[in-house]
């Protein structure tokens, strides 16, 4: 990793949504990788297919609290949530947002817009009609600011955004942009632009199986090519 080590994996999934392992298995895998912290960050309730909601979301939270106690001193188990952009400037952020250690926000498919205004923006973008990356970034950033997001996941996935503008706004808001190791959605040049703006990065596995927890290979290669390790906030230089 070019002298750097990623010490947290803040974006992993389990069978509570569309993953294949349990929260415990993700924690054990993270310990095996030598990580200091791992978060289970399932999709928020607004996702039509994979959203975790109601009693199921409550049960997941209780399980993560229990795992945190069990593995205290070995690894920090974090309660995360990957929110969905529901329409322009709005997400499915829960009322108890403060109960979560990590809030990720991303644009995903299978999230129905709830007003005509949003349908115009997102629908046109998905269909490739009047695709406006700047306007897309504005909608996502407005939602991120309202929900006090820590991370914006996989920028450019499904929806092209204005990276220079997003990077500058995220720097001002203190939001990190994700280099996703499941599918790198940022070009080398875009990563350089983000760093030039002074915006922080986070590397995540976006693991959907325990075997992929702590797998940062693709993201690490991208960050190395862009010479951007100094901007990765969940990595540190090793001797």
Image: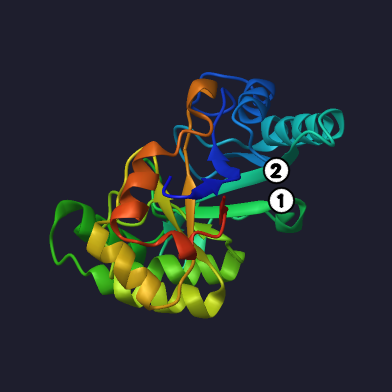
Indicate which disc, 2 or 1, sits on the residue closer to the N terminus: 2
- Along the viewing direction, whichever of 73 and 123 lies nearer the viewer: 73
In the rendered image, residue 105, in percent from the top left (x then y), is placed at 50, 55
Q: Is residue 61 left or right of residue 239?
A: right
Which quadrant is the N terminus positioned in?
A: top left
Distance, label 2 to label 1, CA atoms, is: 5 Å
Q: Which residue is mark 2?
A: 79
In the rendered image, residue 218, in percent from the top left (x then y), is placed at 34, 40
Quadrant of the image occupied by residue 58: top right
Q: Residue at x 57, y 50 (%)?
A: 238
Q: Is residue 153 above or below residue 25?
A: below
In the rendered image, residue 111, in percent from the top left (x then y), is placed at 40, 45
Q: Is residue 166 above or below residue 202?
A: below
- Along the viewing direction, whichever of 206 and 193 lies nearer the viewer: 193
- Along the viewing direction, whichever of 233 and 58 lies nearer the viewer: 233
Q: Residue at x 39, y 62 (%)?
A: 228
Q: SS for tag 2?
A: strand
In the picture, the disc for residue 100 is: 1
* Res 138 visible: no
């Amino acid at each position: 990793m070019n002298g750097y080590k990623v010490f947290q994996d803040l974006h992993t999934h389990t069978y509570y949504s569309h993953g294949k392992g349990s929260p415990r298995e993700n924690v054990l895998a993270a310990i095996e990788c030598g990580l200091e912290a791992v978060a289970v960050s399932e999709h928020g309730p607004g996702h039509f297919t994979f959203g975790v909601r109601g009693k199921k979301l409550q049960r997941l939270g209780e399980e993560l609290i229990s795992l945190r106690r069990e593995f205290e001193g070995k690894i920090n188990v974090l309660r995360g949530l990957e929110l969905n952009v529901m329409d322009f400037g709005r997400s499915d952020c829960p009322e108890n947002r403060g109960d979560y250690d990590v809030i990720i926000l991303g644009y995903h498919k299978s999230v129905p817009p709830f007003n005509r205004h949003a349908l115009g923006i997102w629908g046109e973008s998905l269909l490739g009609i009047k695709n406006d990356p700047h306007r897309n970034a504005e909608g996502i950033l407005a939602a991120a600011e309202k929900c006090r997001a820590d991370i914006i996941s996989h920028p450019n996935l499904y929806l092209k955004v204005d990276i220079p503008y997003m990077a500058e706004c995220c720097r001002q808001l203190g939001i990190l942009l994700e280099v996703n190791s499941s599918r790198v959605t940022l070009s080398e040049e875009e990563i350089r632009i983000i760093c030039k703006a002074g915006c922080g990065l986070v590397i995540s596995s976006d693991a959907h199986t325990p075997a992929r927890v702590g797998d940062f290979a693709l993201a690490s290669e991208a960050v190395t090519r862009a010479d951007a390790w100094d901007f990765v906030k969940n990595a540190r230089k090793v001797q």
